Amino acid sequence: MSDRPADPPPPPDIVLRYATGWPDGADEPEGQRPYATWGEAGTLLVVTWGSSRCPQLPISVEVSDAHTVIIRTELYRPGGPCPRDFVPTTGIVAIPDGLERTATVRVRVDDVETVLPPP
């Protein structure tokens, strides 16, 4: 029997990467609610609030129509204790096919909507 701790599970497949903190250059909205903004070419930045060690991360991204993206998140537990701090975490996801970005886009993260102008 090994005393070595088990490797933590990987983050959800759709998350290209994530980090604790607010995206550089993004305006922080009032309140601590999920938020989305355009990232670098072909990506969306999805901000959620929660534990720094056990963040809410996107688990699904889908286009419901040409101007609406729906993102669901779930608690990610990589192992070990989850501190009771309350911080933003930014997850980066690829923009799904079928989204028309030449007009206003609505991004709904766990039923909280952000309206984004064309990039």
Image: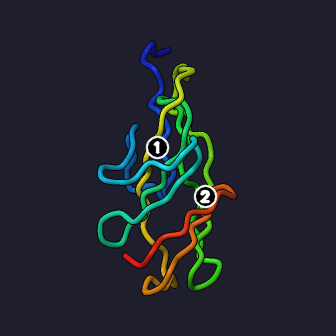
> What residue lies at 61% left-to-right and 40% top-to-bottom?
75
Residue 106 percent location from the top left of the image = 57, 72
Between residue 27 and residue 96, name the one nearer to us: 27
Foreground pick, 83 / 112: 112
Answer with mark 1 or mark 2, whichever residue precedes in sequence.
Answer: 1
Position in image of residue 74 (x %, y %)? 62, 46
Residue, far front: 30
Residue plotted at (47% across, 30% down): 52
Residue in the picture at 47% in, 33% down: 8
- In the displayed structure image, the side of residue 74 where residue 38 appears, left or right: left
What x and y, as percent, mark residue 119? 36, 75
- Check disc 2 and give the amino acid type: Val
**Residue at figure coordinates x 59%, y 46% from the top left:** 33
Secondary element under disc 1, as helix, strand or loop, is loop
Note whether 6 is above or below 67 in the view shown: above
The correct choice, above or below, for 45 with respect to 20 in the image is: below
* Label 2: how many Cα within 10 Å (few below 14, some 14–19, many 20+): many
| Comparing labels 1 and 2, the label whose residue is closer to the camera | 2
SS for dot 2: strand
Judge the density around disc 1: few (<14), some (14-19), many (≥20) Cα neighbours within 10 Å.
few
Residue 41, given in percent of the width and then of the height, sits at: 30, 71
Q: Quadrant of residue 32?
A: top right
Residue receiving disc 2: 109
Q: Nearer the viewer, residue 65 or 8?
A: 65
Report the amino acid beneath label 1: Pro
> Residue most toward the right?
111
Q: Which mark, by number, is residue 10? A: 1
How many labels sit on residues? 2
Q: Contact, CB < 8 Å: mark 1 with mark 2?
A: no
Choose top left, top right, bottom left or bottom right for residue 76.
top right
